[in-house]
Image: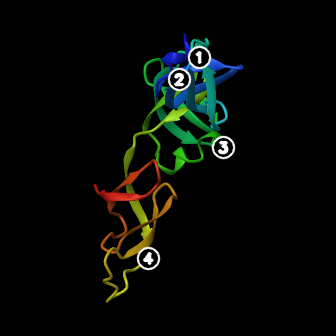
């Protein structure tokens, strides 16, 4: 495919690396050939870089397969996922999913991304509902606007919540930044 076709969300192979486009722009000045600048994320390493291509330069399109999986458990070294259609189980090293594990429980549905049977990672929902397992007591008279206290979720993730949240309460958390969104 032509580099001119690089738009956000498109996946491609360049220099034996697998990338997804985050942002792209095209510029042309005078008689010079146009240039395509693309901010991309390496799907294997997670590194974000900016690549520049001359207009019409070719890159290889990559078809990423997304499979519905159910997170079963974590054995300490690996996370075990099960394909909901074939019941096939897959192991992913815990270090690969450190951020995602803060927001998923046993039985949570996720999407696993793979390219030619190479596992790239999992995608979780933007917002999840989790139970608060422990909070600090609210201090009487601490009524400044937006007052917050520390809390620990059932998954072990620590965050700040409003003073009215109690132990055992279900809250909505953003998986992008790990912050409190609201009550469930």
At x 31%, y 77%, the residue is: 145
Disc nearest the viewer among 4 and 2: 2
- Residue marked by disc 1: 33
Mark 3 vs mark 4: which is more N-terminal? 3
Residue farthest to the right? 15
Q: Secondary structure at mark 3?
A: helix
- Residue marked by disc 4: 136
Tell me how far mark 2 sits from mark 3, CA to CA: 43 Å
Could you say where residue 130 lies in the image, as x and y percent from the top left?
A: 39, 54
Could you say where residue 1 lies in the image, as x and y percent from the top left?
A: 55, 10
Q: Residues within 10 Å of mark 4 (few under 14, many from 20)?
A: some
Asked whether the beta carbons under mark 2 and mark 1 sit within 8 Å of each other, the answer is yes
Disc nearest the viewer among 3 and 1: 1
- Residue marked by disc 3: 95
Mark 4 vs mark 1: which is more N-terminal? 1
Could you say where residue 90 lies in the image, as x and y percent from the top left?
A: 59, 27
Quarter of the image holding residue 35?
top right
Q: Is residue 177 above or below residue 55?
A: below
Mark 2 vs mark 1: which is more N-terminal? 2
Residue farthest to the front? 30
Quarter of the image holding residue 146?
bottom left
Tell me how far mark 2 sits from mark 1, CA to CA: 6 Å
- Residue marked by disc 2: 28
Tell me how far mark 4 sits from mark 1, CA to CA: 61 Å
Q: Is residue 1 above or below residue 178?
A: above
Mark 3 vs mark 1: which is more N-terminal? 1
Q: Secondary structure at mark 2?
A: loop
Asked whether the beta carbons under mark 3 and mark 1 sit within 8 Å of each other, the answer is no
Nearest to the observer: residue 138 or residue 42: 42
Tell me how far mark 3 sits from mark 4, CA to CA: 30 Å
């Amino acid at each position: 495919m032509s580099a001119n076709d690089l738009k956000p969300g498109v996946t491609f192979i360049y220099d034996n690396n697998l990338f997804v486009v985050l942002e792209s722009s095209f510029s042309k000045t005078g008689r010079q050939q146009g240039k395509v600048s693309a901010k991309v994320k390496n799907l294997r390493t997670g590194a974000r870089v900016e690549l520049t291509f001359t207009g019409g330069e070719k890159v290889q399109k990559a078809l990423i397969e997304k499979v519905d999986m159910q997170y079963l458990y974590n054995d300490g070294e690996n996370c075990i996922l099960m394909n909901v259609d074939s019941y096939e189980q897959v192991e992913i090293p815990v270090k690969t999913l450190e951020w995602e594990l803060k927001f998923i429980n046993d039985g949570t549905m996720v999407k696993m991304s793979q390219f030619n049977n190479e596992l790239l990672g999992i995608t979780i929902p933007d917002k999840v509902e989790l139970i608060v397992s422990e909070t600090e007591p609210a201090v009487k008279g601490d009524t400044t606007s937006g007052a917050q206290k520390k809390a620990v979720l059932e998954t072990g993730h620590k965050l700040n919540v409003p003073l009215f949240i109690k132990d055992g309460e279900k809250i909505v958390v953003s998986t992008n930044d790990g912050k409190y969104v609201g009550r469930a």
